[in-house]
Image (cartoon, rainbow, N blue to C red):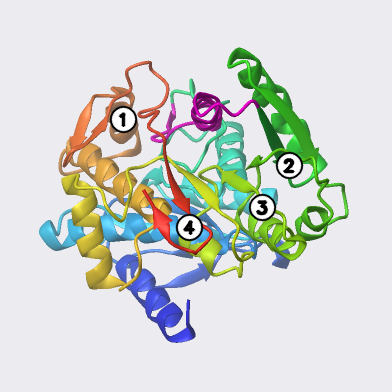
Amino acid sequence: MDSQKFLQRRRLLQATTATAACAVAGMPALALAQSRAADTAGPRVTQLLDMSPDQQEFSRDYATGIRLAFAELRKANSAAPQLSTVETDGTAVAARNAIQLVKNDPAQVALLGTVGEALALSSLKEAAAAKLDIAHVAPWLADSQFDSDPHVFSLFASREDQIRYVLKNLAEMGVSELGIVYPNPARAEALRASTEAIGGRLKIKLRTLTVPAGQDPATYASQLRPDAPFFLVFMGAGIELAQFTQGLSRRGTQRYVVCLADVDTNTFLQLNPGKSVPIIFTQVVPNPRSSKVPVVRAYRDALQRLFDEAPTPVSLAGYLAGRYAAQVIASTGANPSRAKVLAEFQRRRSVDVDGWRIDYADGGRASSFVSQTLLNAQGAFVG
């Protein structure tokens, strides 16, 4: 993203939530959380953002979609809730202070679209510890440990849903062995058991490849063994994936790399990934570039008008989250409170968002939708 477009985007992001910034008191300088909230009175929904260096572009993309939805909502209905943001550095201390900030302001009636995943997990734990009874709507959370929590309303497919879809598709293609690449030992420890269990049920052989502690993914990929599986499922984030493809490209090793929805396409392409490495992106929303679902068309139109940016799955997910949240909150009446908003979300009613179905049929997540798109070796998207 060039600097002029980046500055334009930041101004628009700030304008849609509008106004004053203040530091959260009582936290170390390295655990800064910053609140940007509308200066008009009235109920607000609040988005917590992890703006640490490795996460900030992903967070901005998800926030872009939510802000698009609320910008349209405010244009159509001046009585709609305001959207505010709390920016953090992603640490547990910042999450704790951000939750305390929200708790101390009763005008903040719901948390919407907390991003990234580590911050979402921390904020849920901190809210429980602080006894903050508030709806956590559409956090960016592939981890399913909070799916049964009555305060959590996860909209998109879990990590297990995504892995199951990826492995099943490859098994149906006749792939008999997959490499599962973890960017570090901690990630391997967290995900290996559940991933291997899915592979076992699908009768597909999985070979674990873990980047050693202290080594970057590019170096690891440049030394990849010649007998490594042809299809590699990468279990890390966008920066790590870009480094991994750089190593593959330097080595001249032809492999297909599959990633989960934690990698945003536009952000990935800005990270100078390795050339001629085909990437299969897993998505938890319809194709943002080509879907004819009315809400996706509305998203593309709004994105073009306000940001002049290419559509991405992550910002589309944010847009869907914003549209859904606004629809539910509107049903609580003219004076929504935390308790009223939480109770309304807890009804978990099926909602049609302009052609996109929200349905908590199993009481857990609103959707298990997963699809994929290919970035081919020539750098073009297919599908």
Left or right, 334 with reference to 122: left
Q: Tell me whether circle 4 and circle 1 mark residues in contact (CB < 8 Å).
A: no
Return the residue at label 1: 345
State the CA–CA distance, disc 2 to disc 1: 36 Å
- Give the amino acid type for the residue marked by disc 4 in the picture: Thr
Q: Earlier in the sequence, mark 3 or mark 1?
A: 3
Q: Earlier in the sequence, mark 2 or mark 1?
A: 2
Q: Secondary structure at mark 4?
A: helix
Crowd class of label 2 (few under 14; some 14 to 19; many from 20; radius 10 Å): many
Give the mark toward the camera: 3 or 1. 3
Q: Residue furthest bottom?
A: 4
Q: Earlier in the sequence, mark 2 or mark 4?
A: 2
Q: Is residue 60 above or below residue 366?
A: below
Return the residue at label 4: 265
Residue 262: horizontal and vertical position, in percent?
Answer: 54, 47
State the CA–CA distance, disc 4 to disc 1: 31 Å
Crowd class of label 1 (few under 14; some 14 to 19; many from 20; radius 10 Å): many
Closest to the observer, 10 or 372: 372
User: Is residue 107 located in the magenta-colored stretch of the structure?
Assistant: no
Q: Which residues are magenta?
A: 151-176
State the CA–CA distance, disc 4 to disc 3: 21 Å
User: Is residue 162 located in the magenta-colored stretch of the structure?
Assistant: yes
